[in-house]
Amino acid sequence: MTIVLWPFRKARAEWKSLKDEQSSIHAELVQQRTNCLATLQTQGDRQIELLGKVADTLTGMALSQAEQTGFLRASALPTRRRVAKK
């Protein structure tokens, strides 16, 4: 009777070992995913902050460029000579 049960006990022990290993792999993957999502969330907040700064800078540049363009257009207009009144 012991001879017949031996392969089943061995197979059961191997099965339990594989299931335990699979559980530990699953736990590690869940931890890695959690860490990754937390990092992405932190980086996302920082990127939003930086994009806001870039937008402010670009707005300032657009205003400066509009002012400079207006100045250049005004200086490119032909000037009228003053005629002295007699």
Image: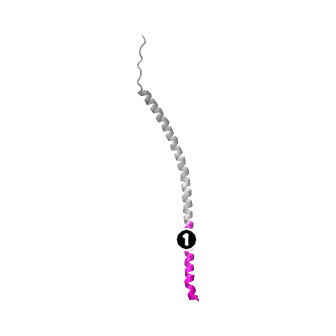
Question: Looking at the image, which is closer to me, 53 or 81?
Answer: 81
Position of 50 compared to 75: left or right?
right
Looking at the picture, how far across and down is residue 36, in whole percent? 54, 59
Please name the residue shown 55% across and 66% down the image. Answer: 28
Name the residue at the bottom extreme. 1
Q: Which quadrant would residue 78 be assigned to in this image? A: top left
Looking at the picture, how far across and down is residue 61, in whole percent? 48, 38
In the displayed structure, would residue 22 be above or below residue 6? above
Which segment is the magenta one? 1-27
Q: Which quadrant would residue 34 be assigned to in this image? A: bottom right
Name the residue at the top extreme. 86
Please name the residue shown 49% across and 40% down the image. Answer: 58
Q: Quadrant of the C terminus?
A: top left
Tell me, yes or no, whether the highlighted magenta stretch contains residue 21.
Answer: yes
In the displayed structure, would residue 19 be above or below residue 45? below
Please name the residue shown 55% across and 53% down the image. Answer: 42
Name the element at disc 1: helix
Tell me, yes or no, whether the highlighted magenta stretch contains residue 79.
Answer: no
Q: Quadrant of the N terminus?
A: bottom right
Residue placed under numbered mark 1 in the picture: 22
In the displayed structure, would residue 84 be above or below residue 50? above
- Magenta stretch: dominant SS? helix
Looking at the picture, how far across and down is residue 54, in whole percent? 50, 44
Please name the residue shown 54% across and 50% down the image. Answer: 46
Q: Amino acid at mark 1?
A: Gln
Name the residue at the right extreme. 1
Position of 73 compared to 8: left or right?
left
Colour scheme shown = one colour
* Disc 1: CA contacts within 10 A as few (<14), some (14-19) or many (>=20): few
Task: Give the total of numbered labels.
Answer: 1
